[in-house]
Image (cartoon, rainbow, N blue to C red):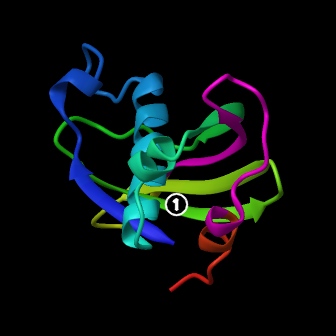
């Protein structure tokens, strides 16, 4: 699991200072990138090798609204790795109290530069399957 903590920026909120629902999805993407960096590689490296991970399924459950200037933590972990698919789990919580704002899940498929579905390279499958911690 990786954790990324930051403060809610004004641009991520609506007129009432509540985080806009779409902002949470951007934070999930940051969680995935942070997970890779925390485990020794980057998503940029994956792309440089000629691959991308396209989101094929996104499930978000909103439990409570985060607000402007609140410290939030995005927790991300790999749930499942298959030859062509990858699944991540997430929680977005109050960084101070741990109260949950969002729980989420994404499924991705590996594509090559031509946009064709391909196997995730074995070295990356091994990387993605490494134990948490």
User: Residue 99 in the image: x percent, y percent?
Assistant: 44, 60
Horizontally, is 63 left or right of 35 in the view? right
- Taking depth in this image into account, of 30 and 62 the one nearest to the observer is 30
Among the 4 quarters of the image, the one containing residue 20: top left
Among the 4 quarters of the image, the one containing residue 109: top right
Q: Is residue 112 magenta?
A: yes
Q: How many marks?
A: 1
User: Residue 77 in the image: x percent, y percent?
Assistant: 58, 65
Name which residue lies at 37% across and 63% down: 37
Name which residue lies at 30% across and 17% down: 14
Q: Is 133 rendered above or below residue 18?
A: below
User: Residue 133 in the image: x percent, y percent?
Assistant: 50, 86
Q: Is 116 rendered above or below residue 36?
A: above
**Farthest residue in the right direction?**
83
Name which residue lies at 23% across and 40% down: 8
Q: Is residue 85 magenta?
A: no
Horizontally, is 12 left or right of 75 in the view? left
Q: Is 8 rendered above or below residue 16?
A: below
- Taking depth in this image into account, of 116 and 2 the one nearest to the observer is 116
Q: Secondary structure at mark 1?
A: strand
Q: Which residues are magenta?
A: 101-124
User: Residue 23 in the image: x percent, y percent?
Assistant: 39, 29
Name which residue lies at 62% across and 63% down: 124
Q: Which residue was labeled with disc 1? A: 76
């Amino acid at each position: 699991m990786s954790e990324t903590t930051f403060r809610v920026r004004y641009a991520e909120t609506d007129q009432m200072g509540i985080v806009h629902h779409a902002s949470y999805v951007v934070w999930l993407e940051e969680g995935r990138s942070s997970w890779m960096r925390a485990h020794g590689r980057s998503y940029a490296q994956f792309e440089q090798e000629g691959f991308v991970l396209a989101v094929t399924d996104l499930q978000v459950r909103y439990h409570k609204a985060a607000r402007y200037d609140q410290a939030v933590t995005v927790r991300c972990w790999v749930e499942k790795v298959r030859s062509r698919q990858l699944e991540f789990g997430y929680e977005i919580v109050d960084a101070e109290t741990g109260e949950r704002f969002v729980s989420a899940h994404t499924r991705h498929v590996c594509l090559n530069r031509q946009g064709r579905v391909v196997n995730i390279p074995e070295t990356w499958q091994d990387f993605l399957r490494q134990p948490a911690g």
